[in-house]
Structures are given as C-alpha cells and as structure tokens.
Amino acid sequence: MPNQRFLITAALLLSALWAGFLGSLHMTGRAGFLDRMEASLTDLRSMLVGSKAPPPAVTILAIDDRTAALHTYPLQRATLAQAVTAVAALRPKTIALDLLFVQSGIEAGDAALVSALRLVPSVIAAAAVFPESTQVVTSDANDPLSAIPVAESLLLPLKRFSDVAATGVVNVATDETGVPRFIPLISRSGGRIDPSFPLRAASLALDRDPAFQPGAISFADRHIPTDTGQRLPLTFYGPRGTIPTFSLEDALDGKLPADAIENRVVVIGATVTGGGDVFPTPFDPVLPGVEVISTAITHLIAGDSIIRNDNIRRLDAAVALLLSLLLVSLIAWRRSVISFILIALVFVVWAAVNIAAFKAGYWLSAALPITAALPLVLVFGAAQLLLGRRQARHFAAQSELLQRVEAPGLGEWLARDPSFLAEPVRQEAAIVFIDLSGYTGLSEAVGAVTVREVLSSFFEIVDQEARAHGGAITSFTGDGAMILFGLPQPAEDDAAHAAACALALADRMRSWLAAHTDIQAGRKVGFKIGAHCGPVVASRLGTGDHQQITATGDTVNVASRLMEVAASRGAEIAFSATLVGAASGKGSPPPPGRSKDLWKHVFAAAPGQSRSGCGAPPADMLL
C-alpha cells in the first residue's frame, strides 16, 4: 500500500538522521544529555561483571580514624615524615602523597618531610581550581589540547617540597551522579600544562616518561588508549579495601608487611571519617578519594584500563545507526509474533554483546543505541498500529460488504481460503431464479426514485430468504436474482433448501405485493420463480480485482427457463421434477409459518424420481 511504503521510507530516513545526529555528538563528546543514562547503565554493567582482584601494583596507607585518634588531625608533617621514612625502608618503587602542601607548617616537621621525600622517588599533590563545577570545551582538530579544560588557578605545593618530589594534579572528572568516570591526564592553567597525579606516579614507577599521541599515551612499549581530552576511563575493582589498604599507624609501628610495599607504588591519603574526600561508585557509595587515585595509578601501570577512545565512539555511532534501522525494518517487515520475537532477540543479543565487551575491557555506549533506536521505534510502531487499525476497519467494512453480497457461510469460507474457486469446480447444486413481472411498465409510470425503493425492498426479501435457507445470491440482474445452493460445499439437502426457499419467497412476495398496491397504478405486477437442481460448474468470473462467484451450465439455464414456464401457465413457481424428487427424498420439515399442505403437495409430486440427490431429467411442476 502506498501509505505503508511512505511510512516505512520516512521511518528509515528519520532513524538514519536521528542516529547520525546523536552519533556525531557522541563522537565529539558533546552528548551531555546522555551522560546520566550512560552512568546508570555503566553502574549496572559493573555490578553484572562484578568485582575483581586488582593487579599487585599499588598499596594504600590510610590516614584513618585510628591514626587520627592517636595523633592530631590534620597529621603533623613530622609524623608524616616518620611514616615516609618507614615505608622507604621497605623499598617501594614510588611514594605518592595524596595531600596538599600549600602552606608552611612547623619548620622542623617541614624539614623532616623534605628529608624523607629524598629517600625514594615521590609525588606530591597539586589541585586545579575551576570557576564552575562543569566545564565546556570546544574540540579543534588543529589543536590537540583544545578538548582539555583550562583551570582558573592551581593550588601548588611549596617550592621546598616540589624541589624534592614530582608534582601531579589530583582532580578527577565525575558524571552527573558524582561517580568519578575519568582521570584527566593533563591539566591546563595560565599557559602551563601539568600532568595528573596518577600519571606522575605511574611514570616514576615505570621509570618512563609518557609520550602523548592522539587518543592515547605510551610508556615505551606500553600503549594506553584515552578518551576525548586525554582522559583515562576508570573502572573500579570493587568496594573500599579492594586495593590493599593499611593504616598509616602500622607504618609508624613498624608493622607493615614487606611484600605489600616492596616494588609497589605506595599511596598515602586520608580516609578519616568526615574528611569529605569520598565518591560514590557502583560497588561502594563512599569510596575514599585515595582509592580512586590508586585505581587510576593501577590502570596506568598494569595497562588494564577500559578502552573508550575515538574508535570505540565511532563504533558506538555505527551500532546506534544499524540497530535503529534494523528494528524499524523488523517492525515494517511483519507485525506478528515472529517479528516481536526477533526484535526481542536483537535487544538480547545486543545487550549480551555490550556486557561481554565491557567485561573484556571495551566501554561500548549503552545509552546511545537505546536513545537512537527507541524513540523512532516507538513512534513508528505507534504509526503502524494506527495504520493497522485503519486497515482493520477497512477490511472489516469490506468483510461486512462481502457478507452483504455473499451468503454468510460463503463469505467466511472466502476469508479462510482466498483461493476458493480460483479454478472451476464441477459439482451438484440447486438453483432458484426469481423475477418481477410488469417491472418495465412500473418503472416508466412511477419514476426512478420510487422504482429504486421498490427494488430495494424486493432485494431485501430475496436476501433474507436466501440467508435463512443457506443459499448464496450469485447475482442481482435488474428486477431478478439467482440463488445458488451447494456452496461452499454441496450437501444432500441442497434441493430441499432450494424448494423451501422458493416457497418462502412466494409467501413473502404475495404479502409484499399486497402491501404495495398504491404504486402499481393499475398495472399488473407479479413474480415468477423457477427452481431446478443438477450438475453445475462453479467458478469465479472476471479478472483482476473484479470477480464474481457464479455457476454455469444446463442446470442454470433450465432453472431460468422454468420461470417462463411458470409465467406461461399463470403460476408463481415452476419446480423441475428432478428438484422435487431430490427434495422429497429428504423429507425436510417446512420452515415456520409456511404452508404445510403446499409443502406436502410438492413432496408428493414425482414419486418416481431419485431420492438420493439431483440428476434426473427435469419434468415441470407448477404451483
């Protein structure tokens, strides 16, 4: 249908445009409205994948409640110097202090900390300050740093500390739910570029300077993909404590296990209750910030960070486009149980692949394909439903029209078997013809409008009696009609039904004519009926969209001629002896309200005829 083809074409085109638009925003990192949905779906995937043991690369020394209870908080730098000295004795690769040293403390403590930091490669923290909590960047292909936000200022450590330890920026990038999803590996402020705290720690631990490339960083032979703006995607190993964590007091007491420190990065940070440096994650609503930083350091050293780079974003856009087009095509293909099963299967397969990719370390977007496909699928599905309802109403009207034209049983049969009588079928049947006499003169006298009303009333009587006796009106011809008994399948009582129908029509027509004496204008208007049974050829006549079910053959011709026999003898009905014999063999009772005497008279005729059906030569019987 033209409307259906137009709707499908429009839906496919709009799906492609919508998915392409969202994909372009996603590839440039500007689809912020999808972030919240993606965050929830990422948390769900993390929970489905579950926690895992981190690589043995980082150990955390926590300034926890136990340490704060035994010492002043914030911790005195002299105490911190003792802990750094104790850790350095166990030969870590690097000590990373997730603490800000922007103000001077007690001189003796500051001097002790400077001396302790000289014992082992160390990193201390700086922090970038932004005017707003959300930064907007504009990507420029000619400027590789354009996607990195510019900080208003930097909180840098005192020079005496930065002279003996490397400095790294500790900022993290959170989504709208507050979950840290990325670690910016580069920060910009006031014309200077600074590496992040995790990047500095990993560089010292690997004893390699990082090399930046578009969408990646490298440590010699170690290649680590990054997302837009040189951000490292984070996936957490589990709840707090998943990365080995010890109290700083254990270091002061000399109780640290050597194998937890040797050849590892030791990160010192605060986990004290009320410290405020906590983040929600899929596994823990209050993961300490020091463990977030330690997760990023582990990713950089072990190279196990999840991959979310330009290639992944392009793949996301392609999946969104293909998924939306596929689902629209499935809905357009066929609205059936198979179609909906296939749609559900597509979603299940896509979800399984997405989760499997996440588990394997590839962060494919879940929000983008859903947002690209779902709205158009719902709108198209609703449009299909409305169009389907309109078509259903159309077909219902056509079916009702068919039931008006054909007998109820025949209409239902055609609905079940559209190929019914596509090829001619020779079979036994009974035929009844009825025709008005005096119709031509009547039409000339009363006019077209009155004649139409008269014919409508006449055809209504014929239709009612044909239906009541199981006949099919195969044609209305001017002022007459042909009724066929034996479709959709011949039966032994077709002749009896035809005879009963003819008698009923005669009764109805007498009453009808008596009630319409006013329109006859002195003209004699009557009727004549002929009925016969025998072999016919049932078929469809016509071509293309215009076909009519009818019957042809000598039986039909004889039934038609019997009307003239009735008229020539001054009778209303002319039955063939063949039909009378076949009908009397069944002994069917008369319909309610019909003349039993007349029925008995008909069945008493032609006693020598066959009682098993139609087939003997006709011999006229007049009533």
Image (spheres, rainbow, N blue to C red):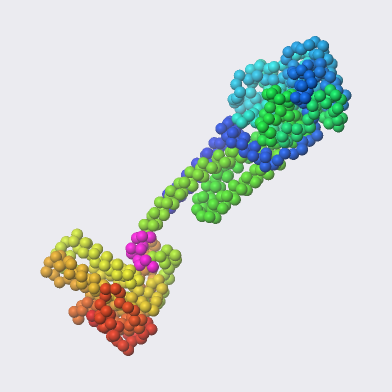
Q: Is 246 left or right of 235, judged from the image as shown?
A: right
* Residue 197 visible in the displayed image: no
Which residue, as the protein is rendered here, is positioned at the far bottom? 608
Residue 223, quarter of picture: top right
Along the viewing direction, whichever of 397 and 511 lies nearer the viewer: 511
State whether residue 446 is above or below residue 62.
below
State whether residue 460 is above or below residue 337.
below
Assign the magenta stretch its main secondary structure: helix
Start-end of magenta stretch: 399-409
Q: Residue at x 33, y 64 (%)?
A: 405
Along the viewing direction, whichever of 218 and 334 lies nearer the viewer: 334
Image location of residue 56, percent across then percent down: 80, 34
Along the viewing direction, whichever of 546 and 606 lies nearer the viewer: 606
Q: Is 247 left or right of 193, judged from the image as shown?
A: right
Which residue, as the protein is rendered here, is positioned at the far left? 522
Instruction: Let me know if residue 39 is in the magenta part.
Output: no
Image location of residue 101, percent across then percent down: 74, 16
Which residue, as the protein is rendered here, is positioned at the far top? 107
State whether residue 187 is above or below residue 564.
above
Q: Is 542 left or right of 8, judged from the image as shown?
A: left
* Residue 567 visible in the displayed image: yes
